[in-house]
Image (tube, rainbow, N blue to C red):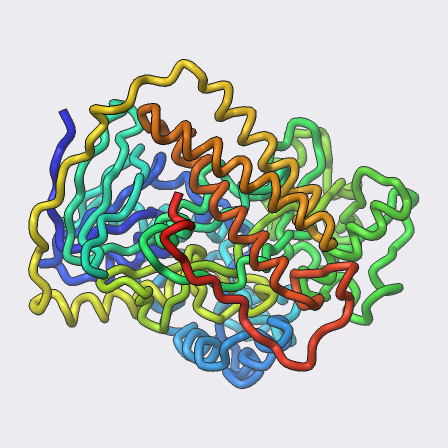
Amino acid sequence: MPKHYEHDVLIVGSGAAGLALALHLPDHCRTAVISKADLTHGSTYYAQGGMAAVLDDADTIASHVADTLAAGAGLCRPEAVEFTVRNSRAAVEWLLQQGVEFDCRDKDDGREFHLTREGGHSHRRVIHAADATGKAISEVLVEKALAAAHVEIFTHRVAVDLIVEAGRCHGAYVLHRQSGKVDLFRARFVVLASGGASKAYLYTSNPDGATGDGIAMAWRAGCRVANLEFNQFHPTCLYHPQAKSFLITEALRGEGGLLLLPDGTRFMPNFDERAELAPRDVVARIIDHEMKRTGSDCVYLDISHKPADFIRAHFPTVSQRCLEYGIDICKQPIPVVPAAHYTCGGVMVDTCGHTDVQHLYAIGETSFTGLHGANRMASKSLLECLVYAESAATDIASLLDKVELPMAAPAWDESQVTDSDEDVVISHNWDELRHFMWDYVGIVRTDKRLQRAMHRAQLLQGEIKEYYSNYKVSNDLLELRNLAMVAELMIRCAISRKESRGLHYTLDYPDTCATAVDTVLQPELTDKV
């Protein structure tokens, strides 16, 4: 039988943003955390590079802000950048208090921690735990959340839709993936921390759950979204037939890794004076250009000129994983290709994570804070998660005594639907969606490609709506429904931008407009599939 739960705060997502928010909430706040799979299944766990913060005496807040604004190609919101950077040291200190060990310390240069430098940064300011920073953070936050008396964890659950009445959110319908039942979760406040939508693309560094669930649910609930045309493609994912989505950290280039053509020729200096340390959008676009120009399936990232002990010490995860595929990075270059990595746009929020719907918050990759602009600078995603998690938690805590649990909501009704015997339709539509998004809404775009993608996305939306109306919901159906909706929003944003800026590059409008304007979409009743 479906179940009914009541909490003060319902958090959808168990990555750095969701768990940090749960831990920042006061002990008397009854908190539920919904996780689509195991607690370490999300993108946080797989983040390699680190977290950018002002930690070195030679660095300054002003310098970090300036670098972020430059990387964002004129579209960063200065107040969001300033807010995040000013709180960066506090975020690191909070992680240290929780027990995260940034274990790459370098006592010889006088620094307490080893700081690396990545693309777009003018200083060494990226604190890290070898090349598995996300894993180190995730494991500690999971341990703390499981031990917190006020936090109740629900794994293998996927949110179906938000419950919104009179402009106020007071819960969600949540599918139990194992039982197939849809339970009712009521709460005073709901927080979307479910990550981005990079699974819209055929090649991605993200785990399978990155299907834009929070963005789609917020859109259906009446929230505005912005700048979804800016999909960051990480320049260097491992190219190997057996490697599904393994990222080669940008820190490898920060420590001297060189990008090479198949014939061993270095090419980045021919295009940008920053060479391998240029921002991600520049590097990804140049790699894409060189692959197409030469007809190559990949390019190569080489750090074998560094001492083997240095490589193994700084990049143990990359070294081990590559060895599993027969690649010794101490002796040979790594085959790499760009892959969809991060959703820079999302649900519009302020510095407290407020959305357009009362008592509904969005944080982390689900949200659009204005921090990343037209291109997210390296090692800023974990930072954004932690800074906005604390800000949202503080805001919620200040309102707990002022907000009553809403009136009862109706239970999920599936009396008019049946079990599906046509799941092949879901898998076929999923494959089609990811192929046309990669081909038409990828690193380089044109109006013709975008219009083709829009046509296919709208046809898919119609097919999915019919399927959703007639069959019981499943995890695959819900993810396809959400991903198709967010894909259409991405395409609509891309069509609206008549220029090339940051991560959005179009052959039809190669120049950048003098004035930078966000692409904001407002939902209407006809949009809510």
The answer to which image quadrant residue 183 occupies is top left
Q: Is residue 10 left or right of residue 75?
A: left
Work out whether 459 lies above or below 517: above
- Of residues 277 and 328, the one drawn nearer to the viewer in this rendering: 277
Work out whether 417 lies above or below 204: above
- Of residues 148 and 433, the one drawn nearer to the viewer in this rendering: 433
Q: Is residue 179 left or right of residue 202?
A: left
Check the image and name the residue furthest to the top. 421
Image x and y of residue 293, in percent: 89, 48
Check the image and name the residue furthest to the front. 526
On the question of residue 376 being in view, the answer is yes
The residue shown at (67%, 50%) is: 450
Q: Is residue 170 left or right of residue 156?
A: left
The residue shown at (23%, 45%) is: 172
The answer to which image quadrant residue 470 occupies is top left
Work out whether 258 lies above or below 120: above
On the question of residue 16 being in view, the answer is no
Image x and y of residue 419, in percent: 32, 17
- Of residues 168 and 40, the one drawn nearer to the viewer in this rendering: 168
